[in-house]
Amino acid sequence: PPGNRPERGFRAPPPPPELKKTFGREVSVLRLRSFTRNPNIHCICLCYPNDNIKYRPPVTSVKMEPANQTCQTIVKEEVLMKGKWAQLLQTTYVDPTGKTRVWETVKRTTRKPNSKCDGVAVLAVLKKTLHYDCLIMVKQFRPPMGCYCLELPAGLIDDGETAEGAALRELLEETGYRGEVSCTTPVVCLDPGLTNCTMQYVSVNINGDDSHNIKPKQQLDDGEFVEVILIPLNELRKKIDEMLQAENIMVDARVYIYALGLTHATSKPDVLPVLKA
């Protein structure tokens, strides 16, 4: 309660009945402590009776299964239209209740046999003496969007090519930079509500002091028009937001979520959520 600071021999008061509703069982106050300069704000440590205060791992997920659940499976796929790079299919599947449903699915036609991955995206960081580390991105016109898009260097994996090999090749072709792979993600999906398209992200470190990277030259294919964009990592989200205000441009979700992640990782909240009124 307000005004009580824990001292030697302090006996915590019984918990209010609301805590039982919150935790679903009887609890007792183990410790009452103030972590702020405000004496009226305290942190209450609770324990369950007869639990001996043992550590219990937090529950990360709860799987709710409907009664009489049926295994969801694909029944059939019918090609409605097929182009050079993509195809539209009608996918028939069984939902958890056993009901047959239909879904419209887009798939690439370029995925190699026995492969689970379509392409790669490159998280390339340029490191140069006396300069901030910069994320290397590309800006190009995307007909489906009808405007320019800010993206990571990316491309499809060629037959017999590894994700790392494809990443270094695409980086060189689109930006002219040469680098070294630091890590590669597992295969991940992009837009599972629409397509089965998958990708691996490859992190690449680029030595900006290397002679090859001082004046990089792109090696674009016919019909490719790509502008290289460098933005310091320490103000990535800020610069992207400024570009959005100044230009008619769309930012790839993967780029923005990366910038947002950097912001969350490096910023500190003014007030801890548990202490907000």
Image: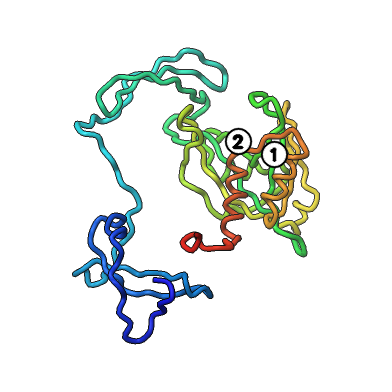
Q: Quadrant of residue 71?
A: top left
Mark 1 secondary-structure assignment: helix
- How many marks the image carries: the answer is 2
Distance from label 2 to label 1 (Cα)? Answer: 10 Å
Residue 171 location in percent, x, y?
A: 66, 43
Dot 2 and dot 1 residues touching (CB under 8 Å):
yes
Mark 1: give few (<14), some (14-19) or many (20+) Cα within 10 Å.
some
131 up-or-down from 53: above or below: above
Residue 182 quadrant: bottom right
Vertical position of residue 210 compared to residue 218: above or below? below
The answer to which of 116 and 210 lies nearer the viewer is 116
Q: Foreground: 96 or 89?
A: 96
- What's the residue at 70%, 40% (across, down)? 138
Residue furthest out toward the bottom = 8
Question: As shown in the figure, which amino acid type bears the numbered disc 1?
Answer: Glu
Q: Secondary structure at mark 2?
A: strand
Q: Which residue is mark 1?
A: 173
Name the outermost residue toward the right: 215
Task: Report the residue at 56% width, 22% height from top.
Answer: 85
Along the viewing direction, whichever of 41 and 52 lies nearer the viewer: 41
Tell me what residue is drawn at x 23 percent, y 29 percent. Answer: 70
Single out the mark in the foreground, 2 or 1: 2
Q: Is residue 271 left or right of residue 247?
A: left
Which amino acid is tagged 2?
Answer: Gly
Q: Is residue 148 left or right of residue 78?
A: right
Q: Is residue 199 left or right of residue 133?
A: left
Residue 194 picture location, percent across and down:
48, 27
Badge number at residue 52: none
Q: Residues within 10 Å of mark 2 (few under 14, many from 20)?
A: some
In percent of width and height, residue 53 lies at 26, 71
Q: Where residue 155 is drawn, which disc sits there?
A: 2
